[in-house]
Image: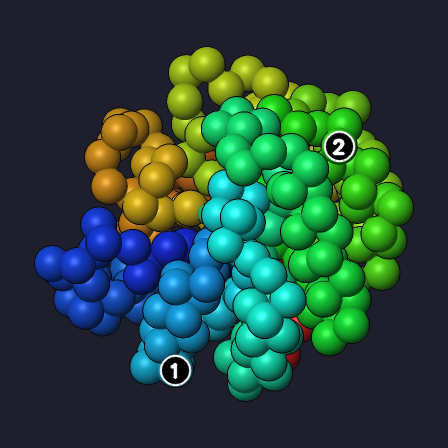
């Protein structure tokens, strides 16, 4: 079954119909979801969802754009949350120079600190990196993030950068962008990368695939991404779903 490795079902965009939507996922072929924390508040709501739904797991962490809220006390709380039974990763953490706030030194500091946290607790990292290819790579190497491994989510760089992450053992998160007309660079990455490192993700409510681009995204649209991968790789859609599910279980260390 399809494994959605990166979702934000605690987002307000699902306020009206969250329960109904989540209840229908299984019948639509989506077997597992990892909901991703992006702030202290959304880490709390992520853990609540994971507690409530057997097929939802949690990543705990603070997105680069929200790192201004972090301090030692919040970091201690995050570390405690890593021990929750449904927590499978630290994320999403990283660098975002597209929005470029808070200042880069602040983003870098808390990216390092959250990688150190992941290493202390032995969980993989979910990395968000936008317009920050070099600094992300440097910090990942300096902090030895490869020791715990993880995923570069919504991968947006080219084949050269992909090769370097793959050589370090990382997975690449592939979502709706792959179906966009102007996604030539990402299609090249998918053609290049081995199937056993590819993870499917929605990043919902964002990044809906074509022909739903701009609408609210959900795991129900993942078959469109499966189809795009299957066309690029020349393998059946069922195989794409099965292999990426096995990849996700391996990376998140779920039996
Ligand atoms: Ni996300």
Quarter where residue 194 is shown? top right
Asked whether 213 or 86 is in front, the reply is 86
Quarter where residue 48 is shown? bottom left
Q: Residue at x 60, y 18 (%)?
A: 185
Q: Is residue 93 left or right of residue 231?
A: right
Mark 1 Cβ and ligand 1 under 8 Å apart: no
**Which callout, 2 or 1, points at the residue further toward the start of the chain?**
1
Q: Is label 2 in contact with label 1 (beta carbons under 8 Å)? A: no
Label 1 sits on residue: 51
Label 2 sits on residue: 135
Q: Quadrant of the C terminus?
A: bottom right
Disc 1 crowd rating (10 Å Cα; few below 14, some 14-19, many 20+) is: some
Asked whether 238 or 9 is in front, the reply is 9
Quarter where residue 162 is shown? top right
Asked whether 32 or 38 is in front, the reply is 38
Q: Secondary structure at mark 2?
A: helix
């Amino acid at each position: 079954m399809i494994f959605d490795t990166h979702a934000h079902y605690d987002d307000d965009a699902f306020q009206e119909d969250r329960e109904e939507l989540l209840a229908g996922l299984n019948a639509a072929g989506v077997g597992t979801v990892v909901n991703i924390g992006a702030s202290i508040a959304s880490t709390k709501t992520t853990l609540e969802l994971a507690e409530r739904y057997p097929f939802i797991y949690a990543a705990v962490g603070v997105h680069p754009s929200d790192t201004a809220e972090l301090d030692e006390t919040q970091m201690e709380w995050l570390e405690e949350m890593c021990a929750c039974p449904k927590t499978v990763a630290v994320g999403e953490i990283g660098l975002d120079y597209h929005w470029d706030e808070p200042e880069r030194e602040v983003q870098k500091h808390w990216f390092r600190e959250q990688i150190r946290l992941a290493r202390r607790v032995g969980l993989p990292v979910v990395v968000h990196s936008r317009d920050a290819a070099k600094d992300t790579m440097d910090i990942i190497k300096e902090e030895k993030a490869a020791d715990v491994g993880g995923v570069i989510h919504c991968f947006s760089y080219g084949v050269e950068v992909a090769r370097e992450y793959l050589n370090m053992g990382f997975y690449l998160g592939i979502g709706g962008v792959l179906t966009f007309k102007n996604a030539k660079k990402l299609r090249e990455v998918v053609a290049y990368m081995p199937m056993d490192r590819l993870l499917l993700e929605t990043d919902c409510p964002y990044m809906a695939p074509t022909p739903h681009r701009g609408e609210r995204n959900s795991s129900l649209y993942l078959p469109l991404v499966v189809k795009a991968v299957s066309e690029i790789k020349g393998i059946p859609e069922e195989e794409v779903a099965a292999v990426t599910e096995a990849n996700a279980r391996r990376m998140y260390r779920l039996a």
